[in-house]
Image: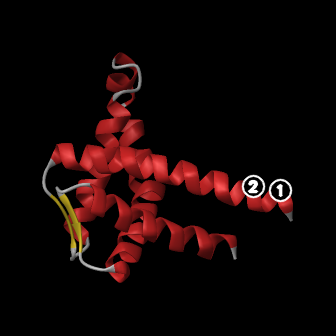
Amino acid sequence: MNIILRFLLNGLAVLATAYLLPGVDVTDYQTALITALVLSIANIIIKPLLILFTIPITVMTLGLFLLVINAIIILLTDYFVTGFTVNGFWWALAFSLIMSIFNSIIDDILKDKKKKD
């Protein structure tokens, strides 16, 4: 149940982030859910590989290159999901940062709910 709730809330977070940023567009809630699913899959499969290949530059930039990797994952999701558009690298970076904030809030909400049960 927690996974389904997290998935639905991530879809809402994608929709809210697209509403906040003029350079990001999501057509509807179904597209936001598909975007959340593709983002999750990309974060599980592709992101660790990118991190592994870029360890030297990540260490040299004290971890700031991970923001670039997050933006690349967003742009890759834009390529695969129709109805989800990001107008460039900087919008993808902003989308990534705002989604991180929303995901932290979602984690806090679901963690509090889990402690009460």
Q: Estimate how packed mark 1 is, as few (under 14), some (14 to 19) or many (20 or more) residues with alpha carbons within 10 Å.
A: few
Q: Amino acid at mark 1?
A: Lys
Identify the residue at image location x=25%, y=58%: 76
Return the residue nearer the eye: 23 or 65: 23
Horizontal side of residue 77 vs 39, given as left or right? left
Quadrant of the image for the N terminus? Answer: bottom right
User: Toward which corner of the image does residue 5 lie, by quadrant?
Assistant: bottom right
Q: Is residue 117 above or below residue 72?
A: below
Horizontal side of residue 28 vs 79, given as left or right? right
Q: Estimate how packed mark 2 is, as few (under 14), some (14 to 19) or many (20 or more) residues with alpha carbons within 10 Å.
A: few
The residue pinned by badge 2 equals: 112
Question: Furthest residue to the front?
Answer: 20
Q: Position of residue 86 (x, y in %)?
A: 19, 59
Q: Is residue 23 above or below residue 9?
A: above
Mark 1 near mark 2, Cβ–Cβ under 8 Å? yes
Identify the residue at image location x=68%, y=60%: 110
Q: Position of residue 23 (x, y in %)?
A: 17, 56
Q: Amino acid at mark 2?
A: Asp
Identify the residue at image location x=52%, y=68%: 9
Mark linked to residue 102: none
Horizontal side of residue 99 vs 3, given as left or right? left
Please tell me how many numbered marks the rendered image carries.
2
User: Toward which corner of the image does residue 70 lie, by quadrant?
Assistant: top left
User: Toward which corner of the image does residue 64 lie, by quadrant?
Assistant: top left
Q: Position of residue 32 (x, y in %)?
A: 36, 73
Mark linked to residue 115: 1
Horizontal side of residue 2 vs 40, given as left or right? right
Return the residue nearer the eye: 107 or 68: 107
Say which element carries label 2: helix
Say which element carries label 1: helix
Q: What is the distance, in whole Å, between disc 1 and disc 2 at their CAs?
A: 5 Å
